[in-house]
Image (tube, rainbow, N blue to C red):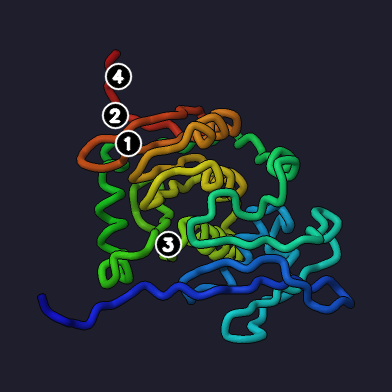
């Protein structure tokens, strides 16, 4: 037995506040996250919760403290989806973040994805996890973070975010694309380092992503939502194989041989 130093993944709270024109900031959400890319996290969360529909509905994002960001919204953002009166509390293991009730869960249904000409070869899909792992710098040091990454049809990594919460990693990734005028991402594949939950399927479809792949397993609700929205959902992408749980026309995977 010996005593030695170890590196830990940082987990701290972030309060996301919103400010309507002419009003004082109001708390919308408190989430446990890994500090960094907080503006992207806030923007991605508001976008996936359908409070905003574009970056143009954000007038600005400012830090009002070390663990607080304020998103200033335009009037048309509030018309599109009024800010809930009750705030959200999200842990790093959140499974239904931003949902206040069963009624709000049903109401926040994602749109059906349009047909695209996206085609990805199965060989490209197989190479994605290794690229993700090579770029997970903080995970390599701590072993304690989830990752989400965007790839193009050729398997080239476009962006990657890490966080203690898988939903935060996806929100940061989507927020980055939103703030850089890259949504909807109809020519992209999203890969997540853990399992594919219902919530991640919703976030992917809200961002217009036609293919979601996960290193781990999908849930039953994730599969049914992917089928409803026209999302191609891949699970257990590791060790030279993967399972396709929802195979739609929005993202065609070539080079496969099917067996009964």
Upstream in sequence: badge 1 or badge 4: 1
Going by the picture, which residue comes out furthest to the top? 260
Q: Residue at x 49, y 43 (%)?
A: 197
Which secondary structure, mark 1?
A: strand
Q: Residues within 10 Å of mark 2 (few under 14, many from 20)?
A: few
Q: Quadrant of residue 67?
A: bottom right
Element at label 3: strand
- Residue under label 4: 258
Name the secondary structure under disc 2.
Answer: loop
Give the residue number, with chain letter if any, for mark 3: 159
- The front one of 106 and 55 is 106
**Residue position marked by numbered label 2 in the rendering:** 255
Please report the residue visible at 67 percent of the width from the left and 61 percent of the height from the top. Answer: 88
Cα separation, mark 2 vs mark 1, equals: 6 Å
Q: Which mark is residue 205?
A: none
Q: Is residue 68 shown left or right of residue 82?
A: left
Q: Nearer the viewer, residue 12 or 255?
A: 12
Q: Badge 1: few (under 14), some or many (20 or more) residues near its Cα, within 10 Å?
A: some
Point out the residue furthest to the right here: 22
Q: Quadrant of the C terminus?
A: top left
- Distance from disc 2 to disc 3, alpha carbons, whole Å, reads 26 Å
**Above-or-below relation of 43 to 240:** below
Q: For the point 73% across and 71% down, which residue is it?
A: 27
Q: Which residue is mark 1?
A: 121
Q: Which marked residue is nearer to the observer: mark 3 or mark 1?
A: 3
Q: Earlier in the sequence, mark 2 or mark 1?
A: 1
**Res. 218 image quadrant:** top left
Tell me the crowding category of disc 4: few under 14, some 14 to 19, or many 20 or more residues within 10 angstroms, Cα based.
few
Mark 3 or mark 4: whose residue is earlier in sequence: 3
């Amino acid at each position: 037995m010996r005593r030695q130093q170890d590196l830990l993944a940082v987990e701290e709270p972030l309060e996301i506040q919103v400010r309507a024109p002419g009003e004082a900031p109001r708390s919308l959400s408190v989430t446990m996250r890994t500090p960094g890319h907080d503006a992207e996290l806030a923007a991605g969360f508001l976008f996936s919760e359908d409070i905003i529909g574009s970056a143009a509905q954000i007038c600005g994002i400012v830090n009002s403290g070390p663990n607080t960001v304020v998103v200033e919204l335009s009037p048309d953002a509030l018309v599109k989806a009024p800010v809930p009166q009750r705030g959200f509390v999200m842990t790093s293991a959140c499974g239904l973040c931003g949902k206040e009730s069963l009624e709000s869960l049903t109401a926040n249904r994602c749109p059906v994805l349009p047909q695209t000409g996206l085609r990805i070869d199965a060989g490209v899909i197989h190479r994605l996890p290794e690229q993700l792992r090579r770029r997970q710098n903080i995970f390599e040091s701590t072993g304690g973070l989830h990752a989400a990454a965007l790839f193009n049809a050729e398997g080239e990594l476009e962006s990657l975010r890490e966080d203690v919460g898988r939903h935060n990693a996806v929100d940061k990734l989507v927020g980055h694309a939103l703030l850089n005028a890259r949504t909807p991402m109809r020519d992209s594949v999203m890969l997540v380092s853990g399992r594919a939950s219902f919530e991640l399927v919703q976030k992917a479809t809200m961002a217009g992503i036609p293919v979601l792949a996960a290193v781990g397993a999908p849930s039953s609700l994730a599969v049914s939502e992917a089928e409803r929205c026209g999302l191609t959902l891949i699970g257990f992408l590791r060790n030279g194989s993967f399972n396709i749980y929802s195979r739609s026309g929005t993202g065609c995977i070539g080079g496969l041989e099917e067996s009964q």
